[in-house]
Image (spheres, helix red, strand yellow):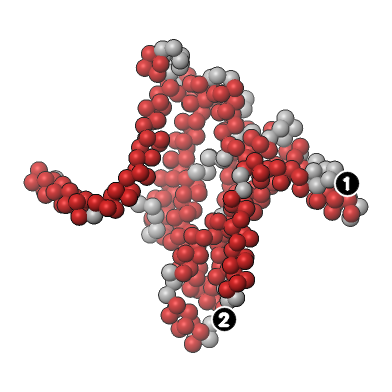
Amino acid sequence: MAPAAKTKRFARAVRAIRRHWQLYLLIAPVLLYFIVFHYMPMYGVQIAFKNFIATKGIWGSPWVGLKHFNRFFDSIFFWRLIKNTIGISLYELAVGFPIPIVLALMINEVRNARYKKFIQTVTYAPHFLSTVVLVGIVFMFLSPSSGIVNTIIRAFGGEPIFFMTEPAWFKTIYVFSGVWQQMGWSSIIYLAALAGIDPGLHEAAKVDGATRLQRMWHINVPGLLPTIVILLILNIGSLMGVGYEKVYLMQNSLNDESSDVISTYVYRSGLLGSQISFASAVGLFNSVVNFTLLLSVNRIARAVNQSSLW
């Protein structure tokens, strides 16, 4: 680009900022947050390639290259961590992603305003529970001695199941408790997208004799498709980012075969084991995989559906 064209473009940008300075002032705290807490800490990424010694600082610590990455790849825990992390994420994506869409479509079809508000309140409420409270409720409900689930099992002549110590049950409990907590809140963005669909399309479909189910399938679902694609890209982009808090609270020595994920391993290695550089390398590997997935899925979505993040 010619220098004159660059200067002209810069001048236009400055004029636009002056004209809409209130909007830029409004977004400034958000930009500052991301700069301070997300971009500036990237300076510490180099710890993953060093043998970090606190007294020497980041710059003074000796460089070891890919030593910590090789150690992680050769670890006996590597494949278990990858399998559990991806397994939980895919399970959560397969179950937790479509349910808010279905819920939004169902709520949108409710005609009684009071009943609609009641359903929304009931489904939104669990989102405001803290992770600790949620896990406490799960433990109470699944208790082998007094939990309501095992009480029902015993009432039908079955034997109590020790859900929280059985590795086979961990992923299902983790995913479905998360779906119960987040499905109402996640449906809000789909309800907003449904509100933006032209009512004239439904009126025309009614005139043509379309049933409610047909209108949902041929009008509402296509209207939601761009939103679904964007959220799917974001979900796949965090496929390796299984939350640490909930897994850690539900984890114990009897179920860690299926509950041990990369985030809990980073906690054990970095904070409990004081292996800062090694934990940083594991965390960086996780972030790079997520970033690669995000770029790949975004490119595929743009090629297939013309809807993407950029």
- Dot 1 crowding, Cα within 10 Å, few <14, some 14–19, many 20+: few
Image point (62%, 27%), residue name: 77
Total numbered labels: 2
Secondary structure beneath dot 2 equals loop
| Nearest to the observer: residue 4 or residue 70 | 4
Residue 131 pos. (x, y %): 62, 43
* Placement of 228 over or under 77, stated as above or below: below
Q: Residue 211: which disc?
A: 2
**Disc 2/disc 1 C-alpha distance (Å):** 47 Å
Residue 47 pos. (x, y %): 43, 22
Image point (44%, 45%), residue name: 294
Residue 282 pos. (x, y %): 51, 28
Looking at the rendered structure, the kind of residue marked 1 is: Glu
- Dot 2 crowding, Cα within 10 Å, few <14, some 14–19, many 20+: few
* Placement of 277 over or under 261, stated as above or below: above
Looking at the rendered structure, the kind of residue marked 2 is: Thr
Residue 79 appears left or right of 199? right
Q: Residue furthest right?
A: 157
Q: Which is more N-terminal, label 1 or label 2?
A: 1
Secondary structure beneath dot 1 equals loop
Residue 9 appears left or right of 151? left
**Does residue 27 appear in the picture of this structure?**
yes
Which quadrant of the figure contains the N terminus? top left
Residue located beneath label 1 in the image: 159
| Nearest to the observer: residue 259 or residue 38 | 38
Image point (74%, 43%), residue name: 139
| Nearest to the observer: residue 210 or residue 58 | 58
Residue 149 appears left or right of 177? right
